[in-house]
Image (cartoon, rainbow, N blue to C red):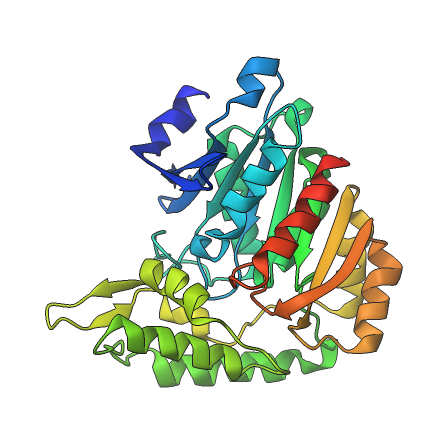
Amino acid sequence: MNSVVAHAISSSTRRVGTASTNVLVREVSLPCGDGITIAGQLYTSAHNNSLKTKQQPHRVLCLHGWLDNCHSFSRLAPRLVEHYSSSAPRDVELVAIDFPGHGKSSHKPVDGPQVVLSEMIYYVAEAVRQLEWTRESEKFSLIGHSMGASLASLYAASFPEQIRSLVLLDGAGPLSRPARDIAKHVRQHVLRRQTVSNKPPRVYPSIEQAVETRCQTARNFPGNQWLSTEAARDMVERATIVEESGGVRFVHDPRMQWPSVQYFTDEQTISVFKDIQCATALLLARDGWPFPDDQLKQVLDVLLPTKFEKLPGSHHFHADPDSYHRVAEEIVSFLLEM
């Protein structure tokens, strides 16, 4: 591993996974050119297959969803590394990052650019640069969930020379809206910003109550969505700090809850799909985000995914203990073919 990346990785290492195939997980800290620091976690196999066979590891970057963090992959990532390393002559080197304003990453300055898709793409590019994954001879795979799937699609279209394969989890390209609604979205953004900008953060008496709030948020979304207590706790533990009072509060940037001022039109989203040059797996949850049939048909007709499956589970099927195994199996079978 290069010195830049080694310097950014915590010396604290712990093992996760089964007794037969252990996985090492370490914190990473990736400084960006604008002063923001991207936090995340690096998962590697303890078997060192790549060292034995002298093959480069299969590098994978995971992008989380809105108001989640890299812990949404804390079950999937070690399972994926285990399964892949036991089936291939090389290892997986998997990094899951926290976007700015999420988890342990920095918040953007108050007077800086608004958090829009193009800004998030910059931070993906900065993470890739700091990891030194930019050499065309060493392409990497992208896995994105929900908002992360939108960003993964946009990144794969913008930097096709870097991407080996693309996995989209209960999400696809950038969220599209009719062009005629632009003024409405600007209005909603401004009114929401005026309403919540000066509100103090809520303090929860216990982490259990913060976890229940996170579960309730999932139930409030369209369709028959849910989030297990176990998956919610994984993310909440990284997304909160303990107050002096003994309570906990979320540390995500409250600006992330403002309605977006940047939406793509259908024409722009189709253009993004057409610019994706790598093999793509689209994995949707049966009880996940309720994509309208016509929208899903359009995605499938233009994206032409190499693999398309509807799997058991809800929107966070990659994080819930009852469904992540199947998601990992589908991803590994796809990656092994690449």
Quarter in which the C terminus is drawn: top right
> For the point 53% across and 38% down, which residue is it?
94
Viewer-closest of 235 and 104? 235
Locate residue 50 relative to residue 216 in the image: left or right.
right
Name the residue: 28% across, 81% down.
199
Given residues 43 and 118, the one toward you in this image is 43
**Residue 305: x and y, percent?**
82, 53
Q: Is residue 141 above or below residue 309?
A: above
Question: Whole-percent x and y of residue 52?
Answer: 56, 14
> Would residue 315 be visible to someone looking at this image?
yes
Which picture quadrant has residue 254? bottom left
Q: Give the percent coordinates (x, y) of residue 219.
A: 52, 82
321 sits left or right of 36 in the view: right
Q: Is 22 in front, or is 158? A: 22
Residue located at (80% from left, 60% from top): 270
In this orientation, which residue lies closer to the viewer: 53 or 121? 53
